[in-house]
Amino acid sequence: MPIEFHRREGIFRLETPGTTYLMGLAEDGSLGHVYYGPSVPDNNMGYLMRTGERPLGPWESPRERASFDDVFPFEYPAFGGGDFREPCLRVRDAQGAESCALRYEGHVIRPGKPPLPGLPAAYGGAGECDTLELTLQDPVLKLRVTLSYTVFRDTDAICRSARIENAGGGPVTLTAALSASLELDNEDFDVLTLPGSWARERTIDRRRLSHGPQGAHSLRGISSHQFSPSIILAQHTATQERGLVYGGTLVYSGNFLTQAELDQFERVRVVLGIHPQGFGWRLEPGESFQTPEAVLVCSEEGLGGMSRVFHDFMRRHLIRGQGKHRPSLVNSWESFYFDFNTEKLLDLGRAAAECGIELLVVDDGWFGARDDDNSSLGDWRENTGKLPGGLRRLGEELGAMGVALGIWVEPEMVSKDSDLYRAHPDYAMTIPGREPALARNQLVLDLTRREVRECVYSQISALLRSAPIKYVKWDMNRPLTDVYTPSLPPERQGETAHRYMLGVYELQERLVTDFPDVLLENCSSGGARFDAGMLYYSPQIWTSDNTEAADRLRIQEGAALIFPLSSMGAHVAACPSHINGRVTPFETRGRVSLTGAFGYELDITKLTPAERALIPVQLEEYKKYGPVFREGDYYRLASWAGNGVYDALMSVTKDKSLAVVVFVQVLSRTNCRSLRLRLQGLEGPALYRDTATGEVRSGFGWMRGGLLLGPFTGDFVSKLTVLERVETEK
Ligand code: GLA
């Protein structure tokens, strides 16, 4: 059974195909973390909680509560006893005191996985997964905490979340309510996070775990450019292929904390959840709070093994639109910015049709009176000056050419210069008596309020009904500031940022339910909301406003540590790059985009004939090899961020019959020989033919001997290698 309670040993056992997760009950009913790692069959593992150990200091007694709390590996640590590490739970009672001590109350094991109301969360039916709901309670506060664990039969991921219910007679306020924690011994760990900024999201940062807290966070109301809501602990010697690695990511898109803390006894506490700063959630008697979900993965097969588990898990159990057709597209943003009209768009559409591009996205600038980014957000009606006949006519004319229509929207925002703001200035999130902080000259709508959500949704849904729109790019271009809502009393203002996220999730849920044929792509000034929460609603996310191929290699490598390649919007853009001025070959730009959700982000009518002739070739490659990257197993072979010279990744179909390798020599090397690239993921004894050279070698040969590449002269030179499994050497 994937989940068992062993009463004699007081051990809860969770099993995934390759990992074991054990929790244990201490004598006083405290729930401790016992073990998480590669499978172990034993149940008598409670000794790892070390409750019997005598402390060396003469003044400490394990019988005393504070000494016990100081070392005990709490499964869901609460603040206010003698545990001074980062807690998951802080509760302020009606007297203003903060203390909580959780003890085991009961548990149930059920097949399948119940949804989390209002929140994005993994899914799976009976037969696919099982869920343990473990209830703890604080007898004084009468607070009940239900920890939920789901294990899947087909992946080594474990989902965790907590529901906190006030079963007492008076109100309490949660000042921290995180999703999960882990207690591990420090096995010479490095901490990996994905810091960045606008246009350089998700750089891989790897450093030694040291004492004190370290990790990632966001207080911007979005998961942010600056960090991914994820954290990885990898043995210092762990590589892409080998070594013990733990990864965690949140199915959440707002303020978060993912933190590892090495303590006084060289143990590590990892916590993941909503950032406690600025958070406060009041629970009246009978009310409960559901935390977002955290996904945990453990792999002994290095970072690559961890990534593949995350990818499979998200593709099978989280991303609802995974199987949707991902059309090749051309986007108007870097083609025209705000300067377009129907005629220009139809010219672009005609060129797209000639090349075989399936969809044209009309990005920012089609609505209200928007000719720059100073106005009209909130007025989701076509600018008929620019688009006579509106989106409907445009969609129909494109449709007649065989090109589908997509649009950009930014539903969470309002410009001061808009009809919406003039009619409802109170819809913008502001603090009474303060001038709100503008960013990109816009304000955030108070989506905690139902009437504001209705106002936005009624406009967007009417639009989608009015024209043949097949794709929506949902953008969000500024952080939250002035976080306050008049819809909540003062003692509940700490709920605003999370209620805002719940409002966003409700809107996206309605959109995907009402318009199941529309492909949704999330975006936030590029990749400021690239997280598993958003992937529940949209199978792809605009990875970065940086569309320059060499930078993109690094950005996509960072994202691929956790997120599947299928989730990354990746477009061929103009040269010199609008973002950094770099000039790269059209062919290389195509290969960097091929590994994600493919498109063009430039005016293809302006290309040279030679470049234009490459588009059908690239589209053919996308048709043939796109599914290998979207659905196959990903292997990172080399990283130019690490070696300074070249980058290589590959993907292998699940049945191991086809493998595609993308290699880019980013900077040329003078007086060099060919590079040897050892491949991964092939079936060792099977034979594979290089479709370009006809060379046949065993999987072992390609993996142990490898592929020789180059020598190449020139920067940004790329090569695509396709290996297909064959029966014989001929
Ligand atoms: C954001 C997006 C871009 C584009 C612009 C439009 O920056 O990331 O792709 O849509 O907004 O204003």
Image: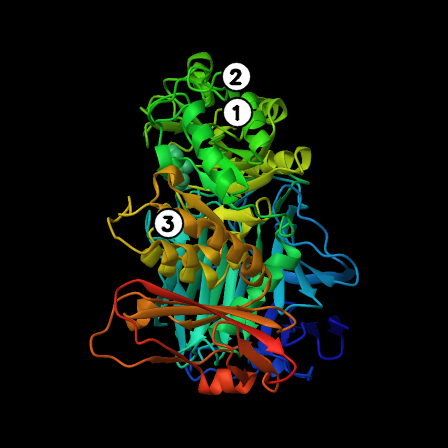
Disc 2 and disc 3: Cα gap in Å?
A: 33 Å
The residue located at (37%, 59%) in the rendering is 588
- Neighbor class of circle 3 (other Cα within 10 Å; few <14, some 14-19, many 20+) is few
Query: In the figure, 361 relative to 166: above or below?
Result: above
Measuring from the top left, give residue 686's x and y in whole percent: 62, 83
**Which one is nearer the viewer's eye here, 68 or 409?**
409
**Residue position for label 2:** 389
Q: Quadrant of residue 640?
A: bottom left
Label 1: state its secondary structure. Answer: helix
**Which one is nearer the viewer's eye here, 518 or 314?**
518
Q: Kindly identify which numbered label has been placed on residue 394.
A: 1
The residue located at (42%, 52%) in the rendering is 614
**Which one is nearer the viewer's eye here, 44 or 704?**
704
- Neighbor class of circle 1 (other Cα within 10 Å; few <14, some 14-19, many 20+) is many
Label 2: state its secondary structure. Answer: loop
Q: In which quarter of the image is ligand 1?
A: top left
- Neighbor class of circle 2 (other Cα within 10 Å; few <14, some 14-19, many 20+) is some
Mark 1 touches mark 2? (CB < 8 Å): yes
Disc 1 and disc 2: Cα gap in Å?
A: 7 Å
**Residue position for label 3:** 611
Disc 1 and disc 3: Cα gap in Å?
A: 27 Å
Measuring from the top left, give residue 568's x and y in whole percent: 48, 52
Label 3: state its secondary structure. Answer: helix
